[in-house]
């Protein structure tokens, strides 16, 4: 029998706090379940009252472990207009990375503050997972600043931090920037998905990305249909190339 060939299905989705532009809830759990990922990176993942939110329900339904990194309270001015806050404790919102694979390490990477950004500090959330063959790969979730002068420095910082970890990796999330400028600060990486993702109703730009390094080949990729957020989800199935010792 031949050696195991590792494939990995990754999805990314900016959930817009689980509401439409009109502030109406949509079914985030069903939308994410339909993506059928092994690794799922959510941006703007809301936990009302700091209780388990829809990310927890997705993890339970798909048999995944959930790793969360709140970056603001739901009183922050960056929350969607029309969002109905429940009474009680203040909630939070941030990154969530879910995976069905064994996690061997987690690192929170401080990406700093972009002047004018309502979020005080942004972070990358990197999980190193064990693949079926025994190889390891690092998947880093990110939601970079929407300030044009902030996203590229943050993405450069994350790229270098993930390279320092070593081994196969992917940087996944809402980068708030187009592909060509990002490529200039992520040398050695390429996009696994190409297609317009924002705004979801009539997308004209790709700002949601899966950036892979030289250890992967892309088997398939897609920009998914509009499911309610202002962003469209993206998916990619990637295969690990043989790594020479």
Image: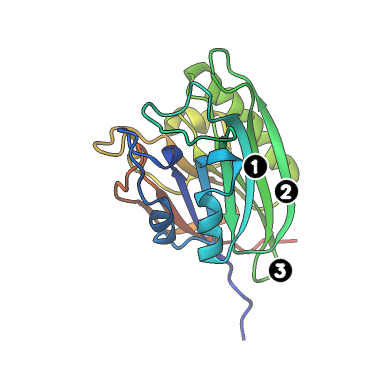
Q: Is residue 213 visible?
A: no
Q: Nearer the viewer, residue 242 or 62?
A: 62
Which residue is the extreme one toward the bottom? Answer: 1
- Point out which mark residue 106 bears: 2
Residue 124 image-quadrant placement: top right
Colour basis? rainbow
- Point out which mark residue 85 bears: none
Q: Separation of disc 1 and disc 3 at Cα?
A: 22 Å
Q: Nearer the viewer, residue 202 or 62?
A: 62
Q: Is residue 218 visible?
A: yes
**Residue occupying the point 54% across, 61% down:** 38
* Precedes in sequence: disc 1 or disc 2: 2
On the picture, is 117 further left or further right than 167?
left
On the picture, is 231 further left or further right than 144?
left
Callout 2 secondary element = strand
Pick the quarter of the image with the C terminus: bottom right
Indicate whether 132 appears above or below 230: below
Tag in front: 2 or 3: 2
Callout 1 secondary element = strand
Tell me where residue 127 appears, x and y as whole percent. Answer: 67, 50
- Point out which mark residue 134 bears: 3
**Residue occupying the point 47% across, 47% down:** 12
Indicate whether 128 appears above or below 157: below
**Residue occupying the point 57% across, 66% down:** 63
Residue, disc 1: 125
* Precedes in sequence: disc 1 or disc 3: 1
Q: Nearer the viewer, residue 113 or 161?
A: 113
Q: Separation of disc 1 and disc 2 at Cα?
A: 7 Å
Callout 3 secondary element = loop
């Amino acid at each position: 029998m031949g050696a195991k060939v590792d494939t990995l299905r990754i999805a990314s989705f900016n959930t817009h706090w689980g509401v439409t532009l009109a502030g109406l809830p949509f079914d985030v759990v069903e939308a994410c379940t339909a993506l059928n990922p092994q690794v799922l990176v959510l941006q703007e993942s809301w936990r009302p009252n700091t209780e388990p939110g829809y990310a927890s329900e997705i993890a339970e339904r798909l048999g995944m472990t959930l790793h969360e990194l709140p970056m603001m309270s739901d009183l922050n001015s960056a929350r969607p207009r029309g969002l109905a806050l429940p009474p009680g404790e203040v909630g939070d919102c941030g990154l969530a990375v879910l995976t069905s694979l064994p996690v061997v390490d987690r690192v929170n990477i401080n990406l700093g503050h972009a002047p004018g950004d309502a979020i005080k500090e942004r972070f990358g959330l990197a999980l190193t997972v064990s693949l079926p063959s025994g190889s390891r790969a690092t998947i880093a979730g990110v939601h970079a600043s929407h300030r044009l002068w902030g996203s590229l420095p943050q993405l450069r910082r994350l790229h270098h931090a993930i390279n320092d970890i070593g081994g196969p990796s992917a940087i996944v999330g809402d980068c708030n920037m187009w592909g060509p400028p990002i490529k200039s600060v992520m040398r050695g990486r390429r996009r696994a998905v190409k297609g317009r993702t924002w705004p979801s109703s009539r997308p004209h730009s790709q700002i949601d990305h899966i950036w892979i390094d030289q250890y992967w080949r892309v088997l398939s990729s897609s920009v998914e249909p509009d499911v309610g957020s202002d962003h469209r989800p993206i998916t990619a199935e990637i295969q690990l190339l043989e790594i020479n010792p």
